């Protein structure tokens, strides 16, 4: 059987359209770019040739001729595109880019720094004009080198140490302060905290907010109630079971992110304690309001974060050279029942310190 050799069809060029239409390349360029200073007859000949050849403008070549503007594609790189926060944020970016005729590419790296870098470099090697990145850690020296090549970078959810780049994120510390204060006001002094990897910025900030409020309230002995390095719902479920099996278990829990909240709720249901142990999640969860009890959350605004990140990236691509700035998006406490389960000190004579915190804490 003879070997068949298939040749890839060459992409039609302006020169090809010019030759088929019998007009100059300049005339073809004018018609393709919407210039009305071409006679109807010539414009029709060009359009006929374009359709016949299947010609499509090269966005990179167009951008290089203009010297600025998007090339038609940006990338979004996150830990897990299936995470509800990332899904909503990604959709907001996609919608904002589509409104400007820009294609959005995406990838997940599953908390692997090597996978993160590989994904970003794979996209930039394909000449995307910008990247919206949820970084793994604060250490990213290679991003400086990347930006020197002209690729714009906007960070979401967390900053990178020493990198002068726009970052759009929730006020993570204030979110944890709000959740902790809420539980104190409902009579809880023994509050457990379920955290992600301790070197992640969001974990550091949320634990700091948690500690600030308990320290101000003079609530001692909470260090042993913190569980970190929890990778997903399964790890959180086991951590809650272990915490509640201790000699002096917590009466309330704060889940540092949505997947940990799912694991915590499963553990409470499994132990039949979901109406006795309070729970607040530092992120919203789909269908959380349909559970019994509904899960109280300090909700982020991933849609707003995505829209702001897209706006910043488009501005940078268009030539905005103003200093990079952080954009802190506020959070919102949504009480649904689990965070309002009363603790042992709700009707007791609280210590002066705790009472002071209850009366003086702002609503953030």
Image: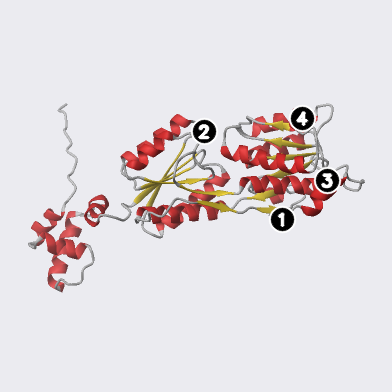
Residue 203 in sight: yes
**Circle 3: is it few (<14), some (14-19), or many (20+) Cα within 10 Å?**
many
**Circle 2: is it few (<14), some (14-19), or many (20+) Cα within 10 Å?**
some
149 left or right, relative to 135: left
Mark 2 or 1: the one toward you: 1
The residue that appears at 24% across and 55% down in the rendered structure is 62
The disc placed on residue 363 is: 1
Q: Which of marks 2 and 4 is nearer the N terminus?
A: 2
Q: Earlier in the sequence, mark 3 or mark 1?
A: 3
Secondary structure at badge 4 equals helix
Q: Check if mark 2's residue and mark 4's residue have beta carbons within 8 Å.
A: no
The residue that appears at 13% across and 66% down in the rendered structure is 45
Q: Determine whether 194 is above or below 153 in the image.
A: above
- Residue placed under numbered mark 4 in the picture: 243
Q: Which of marks 2 and 1 is nearer the N terminus?
A: 2
Q: Check if mark 2's residue and mark 1's residue have beta carbons within 8 Å.
A: no
Residue 351 in picture, x, y percent from top left: 88, 44
The disc placed on residue 111 is: 2
Q: Check if mark 3's residue and mark 1's residue have beta carbons within 8 Å.
A: no
**Circle 1: is it few (<14), some (14-19), or many (20+) Cα within 10 Å?**
few
Q: Distance between the residues labelled 2 and 1?
A: 33 Å
Residue 292 in picture, x, y percent from top left: 76, 47
Secondary structure at badge 2 equals loop
Secondary structure at badge 1 equals loop
Colour pattern of the rendering? secondary structure
The disc placed on residue 354 is: 3
Q: Distance between the residues labelled 2 and 4?
A: 26 Å
Q: Distance between the residues labelled 4 and 1?
A: 29 Å
């Amino acid at each position: 059987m003879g070997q068949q050799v298939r040749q890839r069809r060459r992409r039609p060029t302006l020169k090809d359209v010019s030759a088929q239409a019998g007009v100059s390349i300049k005339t073809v360029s004018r018609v393709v770019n919407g210039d009305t200073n071409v006679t109807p007859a010539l414009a029709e000949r060009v359009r006929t040739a374009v359709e016949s050849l299947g010609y499509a403008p090269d966005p990179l070549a167009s951008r290089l001729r203009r010297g600025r503007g998007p090339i038609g594609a940006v990338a979004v790189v996150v830990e897990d595109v299936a995470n509800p926060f990332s899904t909503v944020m990604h959709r907001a970016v996609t919608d904002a880019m589509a409104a400007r005729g820009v294609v959005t590419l995406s990838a997940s790296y599953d908390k692997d720094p090597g996978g993160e870098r590989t994904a970003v470099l794979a996209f930039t090697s394909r000449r995307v004009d910008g990247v919206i990145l949820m970084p793994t850690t604060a250490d990213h020296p290679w991003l400086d080198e990347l930006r020197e090549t002209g690729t714009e970078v906007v960070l979401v959810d967390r900053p990178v140490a020493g990198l002068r780049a726009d970052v759009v994120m929730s006020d993570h510390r204030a979110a944890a302060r709000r959740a902790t204060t809420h539980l104190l006001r409902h009579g809880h002094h023994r509050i457990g905290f379920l955290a992600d990897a301790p070197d992640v910025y969001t974990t550091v900030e949320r634990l700091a907010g948690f500690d600030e409020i308990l320290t101000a309230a003079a609530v001692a002995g909470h260090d042993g109630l913190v569980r970190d390095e929890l990778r997903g719902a399964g790890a959180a479920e086991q951590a809650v079971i272990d915490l509640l099996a201790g000699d002096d278990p917590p009466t309330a829990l704060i889940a540092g992110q949505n997947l940990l909240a799912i694991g915590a709720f499963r553990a409470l249901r499994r132990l039949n304690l979901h109406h006795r142990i309070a729970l607040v999640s530092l992120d919203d969860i789909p269908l959380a309001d349909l559970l019994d009890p509904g899960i109280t959350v300090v909700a982020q605004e991933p849609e707003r974060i995505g829209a702001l990140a897209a706006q910043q990236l488009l501005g940078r691509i268009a030539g905005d050279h103003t200093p990079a700035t952080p954009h802190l998006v506020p959070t919102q406490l949504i009480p649904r029942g689990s965070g309002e389960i009363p603790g042992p000190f709700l009707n007791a004579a609280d210590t002066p310190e705790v009472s002071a915190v209850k009366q003086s804490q702002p609503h953030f």
